[in-house]
Amino acid sequence: MAIKKFAVACYDDEEVLFPAIKKVRRSGYKLHDVYTPFPVHGLDHALGLKETDLHIAGFIFGLCGTSTALGFISWIFTSDWPLNFGGKPHFSLPAWIPITFELTVLFAAVGMVLTFCYLNQIMPGVKKHVFHPRQTDDYFVVAIELTQHASEEEVVTFLKSTGAKETSVQVAEEGWWYGRWDKQEPYELLNA
Amino acid sequence: MTERFEVPARLKTTSIALIAIGLIALVIGGITLLGGNEFDKTRFWVVLLQDAIFFTLITTVSVFVQAAASLAQGSWIVAYRRVPEAIGANVWLFGLIMLVVSFIIVFVFKIDGHNPIYEWVYPKGDKILEGKSAFLNPGMFAAFSIITIGLWSFFGLKFRAMSLAQEKAPKGSTKIYWNVVRLSGAFLLVYALSQMSTTPWFWIMSTQPHWYSTMFSWYTFASAFVSGMALILLWVVYLKNQGNLELVNKEHLHDLGKFMFAFSIFWTYLWFDQYMLIWYSNQPEETVYFKLRQQGPYSIIFYGAFIINFCMPILILMSRPSKRNYFTLTFMAMVIIFGHWLDFYQMLMPGPLGSNWHINFYEIGIFMGFVGLLIFAVSRTLSKASLVPHNNILLKEAVIHLS
């Protein structure tokens, strides 16, 4: 949670975006993040992002679902409230498999959604800075953090040379905060 | 790195040696088993039938995969499309063996006035079989088998021929491409009406003609499909190791690994579906199938196939790195093919053989013979054309494919 200064470049085409990202990474400037209106295939490779561990969480959630279902059903039908279904044994595994399967899927799915929200810091009420309103429409937005080693003009000229349609320098909160969209935030006063 | 595959001497010798082992097993089996009692004679034929069915079905999967990918305009397959093409172009070979073996069994094989493998050939005196004889009779069997195998072989050869014709077509021409899409739709219709319904009824389910299951054809299809994908993967890895197929990378292998993983789960789903419905309703005419397999003499194969075909793939192939690793993929592909061969074994044997089953030199020898034949035929077809489908309009998309 810190307020930082960013140089922002907007591109209107993936074919310009990919070489630009390559150049930014080669130049050594600190790449903050890239915002795209839709999932771009291969962007994670271009950014050199680490493989996510979300699926391991999914596996563990699934195992929790399996054990919850099997444990709960077998407890109910063998000791807590045994019932006779068509003469089948009380402990009748085949009949429980569909429910076990469903609960595994449910736990894995819901757990992974929540983990995903946690990892990406999204939740109702959580607010993050929007670098350009058209990043959800048709612009691919690249944000570079300005450090003491990179001057404003230098980075902006560099970004323009990579084919950016629009460039700007913004002071913004890099993390998330609780707030409302209609309330002005401190960094916006700074920008003004 | 070469675009053309020349059959290495070692592969050729291996395949011929395997065929020789198969022939020796056939001869020894013929001498010892055909001179034996009723079960020995039955075993001689039913083992041949099992291998012929298994290899016909898994080679046809290659035709199905091409058709499904063409119809969906999937490009992921194009980088190694020559492999399923070459396997699919050899369906006629295994189909022919299947026709010969099954026709001998239906029309010639007879012990004391009844047919131990296909009981319905002589339905006299059995009310249920007499009732079914409008569908289950030698004429229908022959007609359906000939039409099925004829169409499968035709489409297998046709897809290959069209893909080779695309190479010579003017650059960027899409005429053949759309013809393939149209033919693929036709093939899927044929496949749905044969592999996914009638064919397994005639060939496999009718070995226990009093029993029936509406899930059976799907179950057979799932079994064949996952082993067919494993077969394609084995060829891709082999060619890659030979220095061919330089356009194929880990992304493509990852896709094949996903298919093996996902369809192992799909197989288990159908396996369990069929089981649970019969277990739940508990009707004697249906449970007889699982009585023999689950509690009877076949329980070791029944549970063994389940462990090999479900527990191993789900645990080993679940993680991403294992689907991108040559060793685990190759190992699992071989395990899956063997596991589903066992699965076909437990589908076919209990009806004709009862508790008199054996897996020894004869079963293994015949299986090796078929493997040798497959290697020999497919490598020969592969060597006849360039391994890169030049001029295919999806080739670039296939090369930059990310799984």
Image: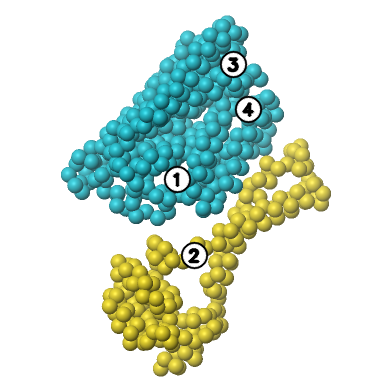
Chain colours: A yellow, B cyan
Percent of width and height locating residue B301:
63, 30
Q: Position of residue B166 (x, y in %)?
A: 23, 41
Q: Quadrant of residue A131?
A: bottom left
Label at residue A50:
2
Q: Which residue is mark 3?
A: B127
> What is the secondary structure assignment of the residue under circle 3?
helix
Q: Where residue A95 sits: x, y (%)?
A: 68, 43
Query: Would you name the residue on which mark 4 appears?
Result: B289
Mark 2 neighbour class, 10 Å CA radius: few under 14, some 14 to 19, many 20 or more: few
Residue at image point 63% right, 58% down:
A61
Question: Which one is earlier in the sequence, the residue at label 4 or at label 1?
Answer: 1
Quarter of the figure that contains the N terminus of chain B: top left
Residue that appears at 57% across and 46% down: B316
4 or 2: mark nearer the eye: 2
Mark 3, chain letter? Answer: B
Mark closer to the chain start, 4 or 3: 3
- Amino acid type, label 4: Tyr
